[in-house]
Amino acid sequence: MRIPPSFYNATGRILLFILLEAFCLFLVAKNGIIERFLLNTKAEHLRSFLLEKSEGVKNYFNLASVNADMARQNAQLLSENARLGKIIEQYEGDSLLKREFPGGRDSLSGSMFEYYWAKVVKNRLNGGHNYLVINKGTDDGITEDMGVVTTCGVVGIIRSAGRRYSIVLSFLNPTQNISAKLGHDNAYGILSWDGKSLHSATLSDIQQHIPVNAGDTVYTGGHSALFPPDIPVGVIREAGFSGGMHKSAKVELFQDYTLLDYVYIVKNREKAVIDSLSLLPATNYTDYKKEASR
Amino acid sequence: MSGTRFLLLTVVILVIQLFVAEFINVHHMLYIAVILLPVMILPYRYNRSVAMLIALAIGLLTDLSYDGVLGLNAAALVAAAFFRDPLLSLVASKSARENLSAIGPHTLGRGKFTLFTLLLYSLFFIFYIALDNVLYFSFFYTFGRLVLNVFANTVVMVIMESTLLRGPFGGR
């Protein structure tokens, strides 16, 4: 039987279609923000110029400097607050240590977190993958994988840092999960965007014996090296069981992501130490036990 | 429509797309995708393989230009280019299609062009939303987003049809 040439044409077209779609899917899966940012760095001067010009119009002229000054002061207050919190924690910890282990360790000094302020120059809120561009980069000491917060919640994580600008992968993304806790009894869970509304998220993996009620406040948990603990994130609107084993709750977020203007970048001074500890192989604990038993 | 005129139209549409994406944010669920227009009215003399490659180039250029997620527009436009002819066969007879020099309201008629636009946008957004929402699948949310985007974009396209395609880029 002779196969007509149109069969090969049709098959070729279908194969080409599958190939091109697979290529696009690969690009989406790679989430091309980094690649695009690298491409854009060559045109960064033009980009900076355009961003600054368009922002200048938005900043109502002289109000921009007033806002910037207030943001700077707020960042200083946050750093001071974090430092004082650390001192209190140290004091309480040292007191406990002295009670439990008289003649124990020396106390540490300084705060774990340091804050930098930055202005949002672009805020993409369209669909399921959202991000921001802020006007601080490596020249200002910003590096990748720093947390970004406001006093009303978590904004995201620095994904790429250029010299003067950085890209922040917004909390409103499918890959973003943060450690969170309920205020009343430090019950921990995982907070992630629900993908539906810019104002709500889902708190999941809460132990089923923990009472979760509408109106309970949700805070950052502090179980990661990226975000400081105890930042109020939102309030529980409704709760229920998910999968029968854990509870989950719908959280109304305090942060209005459409109104982001100034944000605070969180630098964890001890992140390198924490990261190096988390990279230790699991067998080390066994080795440690063997050492200890000798 | 000549190749030069098509290229010029594509550049104009790309600029409009960038402007819309940058400055017009009605709702985070709504994406105005005027960039489908060049693929929709791509000269009929190009075969589907060439149409898909042109759609891929336009899609990647769009994604790169307005800082979207690289691959989203490209995937949706390639699908639109692939299914353009089968969808056209649903609204126009074989003899009408054989005499088509280009797809437009002046060749298909306003009603059929609007129906064709509606079908093509449905397909475009099925691919676009499926890729964008892959980790958030919720039937009602996804369906709502699809319906909203298809109808809003069809309205925008009908408005553009009465301005761009009948004005400087009229394909007669």
Image (cartoon, rainbow, N blue to C red):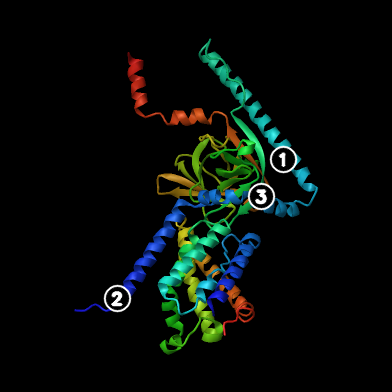
* Disc 1: host chain: A
Q: Earlier in the sequence, mark 3 or mark 2?
A: 2
Residue A22 placed where, x, y %?
39, 60
Residue B141 visible, this orientation = no
Up-down relation of residue B56 to residue B109 (above or below): above
Check disc 1 and report the residue beneath it. Answer: A71
The mark closer to the camera, 3 or 1, is 3
Check disc 2 and report the residue beneath it. Answer: A7
The alpha-carbon separation of the residues under discs 2 and 1 comes to 66 Å
Same-subunit check for callouts 2 and 1:
yes
Up-down relation of residue A283 to residue A251 (above or below): above
Same-subunit check for callouts 3 and 2:
yes
Residue B41 placed where, x, y %?
52, 77
Label 3, residues with CA under 10 Å away: few <14, some 14-19, many ≥20:
some
Residue A165 placed where, x, y %?
62, 45
Query: Most extreme residue toward the bottom, as rendered?
Result: B95
Q: Residue at x 53, y 59 (%)?
A: B63
The alpha-carbon separation of the residues under discs 3 and 2 comes to 52 Å
